[in-house]
């Protein structure tokens, strides 16, 4: 709290406005997690927590939630799911704290990314282990005749494909996007399509973004756990990430070839 009274809830919401464009169409985040996150941010301000402290806390809470889910203790399943929801709320709070108190810094951004990323990295494996230890949560516990280990493989494969998709996108931004934007001034380069988007394409992009964010994963996991269909969720996301990663690779490779042709044709270095 710098130079005056503690921020109000209105101040916290106002400081968050810069994220409105990014989160506007993230339905679960906007209408479920963010409103609660603003209240928790207000509490954190009055307790005197820093954004870095909340980042560390969120990482520990996330690990506890994952541990509860893979422990094999049935009674811990609801607690594990609730703790994962709390982890995501805290991951909202650290950024809101930094924006509200104007304490954003590279170390805080690093912690925010790492403490959240570590939990995201193994999320689908955690879901697979949860189902493996509690086969009653599966619709097809025998893995379509392949055995119970089948679903562990699906969980691991989903983790791999999710990481691969992120790696493709980060590598594109690091190595190709600048050259692509020089070839096509005024057109967005980092997105999946580039250029002006028609209504259906824009809707599809918003849908894809919603399917990829952690908040949606947690809500879908809660539903799948409730109706005993965790294997259906795993299989759906395995296919989703496989198709998404393949299409992104094809798109970015095509852009890369166009960049190469322009590069060699113009003698650019």
Image (cartoon, grey):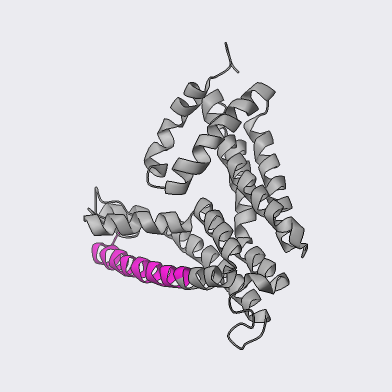
- Give the residue furthest to the top: 4
Q: Say which quarter of the image contains residue 4.
A: top right
Residue 259 inside the magenta-drawn segment: yes
- Locate residue 163, reporting x and y percent: 54, 63
Query: Is 55 situated above or below 192?
Result: above
Query: Is 229 situated above or below 183?
Result: below
232 or 163: nearer the eye?
232
Residue 243 inside the magenta-drawn segment: yes
Q: Say which quarter of the image contains residue 58.
A: top right
Q: Residue at x 64, y 46 (%)?
A: 87
- Locate residue 27, reporting x and y percent: 42, 47
- Give the residue furthest to the front: 227
Query: Can residue 61 be seen?
Result: yes
The N terminus is located in which quarter?
top right
- Locate residue 89, reporting x and y percent: 59, 41
Q: Residue at x 41, y 55 (%)?
A: 209
- Locate residue 149, reporting x and y percent: 68, 80
Query: Is 149 situated above or below 247?
Result: below
The C terminus is located in which quarter?
bottom left
Q: Residue at x 47, y 68 (%)?
A: 241
In the picture, measured across the screen, residue 188 lies left or right of residue 230, that is left
Q: Residue at x 50, y 38 (%)?
A: 34
107 or 116: nearer the eye?
116
256 or 19: nearer the eye?
19
Query: Can residue 173 be seen?
Result: no
Q: Which residues are magenta?
A: 240-269
Magenta span: helix, strand or loop, mainly? helix
User: For the image shown, how many numbered marks are present on the structure?
Assistant: 0
């Amino acid at each position: 709290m710098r130079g005056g009274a503690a921020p109000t809830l209105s101040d916290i919401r106002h400081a968050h406005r810069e994220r409105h464009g990014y989160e506007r169409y993230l339905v679960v985040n906007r209408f479920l997690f963010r409103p609660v996150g603003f209240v928790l941010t207000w509490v954190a301000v009055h307790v005197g927590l820093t954004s870095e402290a909340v980042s560390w806390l969120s990482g520990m809470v996330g690990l506890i939630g994952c541990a509860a889910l893979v422990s094999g203790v049935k009674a811990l399943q609801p607690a594990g799911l609730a703790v994962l929801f709390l982890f995501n709320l805290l991951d909202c709070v650290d950024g809101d704290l930094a924006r509200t108190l104007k304490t954003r810094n590279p170390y805080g951004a690093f912690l925010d990314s790492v403490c959240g990323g570590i939990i995201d990295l193994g999320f689908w494996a955690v879901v697979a282990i949860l189902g493996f230890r509690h086969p009653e949560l599966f619709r097809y516990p025998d893995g379509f005749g392949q055995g119970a280990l089948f679903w562990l493989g699906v969980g691991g494969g989903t983790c791999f494909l999710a990481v691969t998709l992120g790696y493709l996108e980060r590598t594109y931004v690091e190595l190709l996007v600048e050259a692509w934007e020089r070839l096509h001034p005024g057109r967005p380069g980092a997105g999946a399509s580039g250029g002006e988007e028609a209504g259906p394409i824009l809707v599809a992009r918003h849908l894809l973004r919603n399917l990829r964010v952690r908040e949606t994963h947690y809500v879908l996991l809660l539903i799948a756990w409730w109706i005993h269909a965790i294997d259906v969720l795993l299989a759906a996301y395995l296919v989703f990430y496989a198709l998404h990663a393949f299409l992104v690779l094809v798109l970015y490779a095509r852009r890369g070839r166009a960049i190469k042709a322009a590069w060699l044709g113009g003698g650019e270095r």
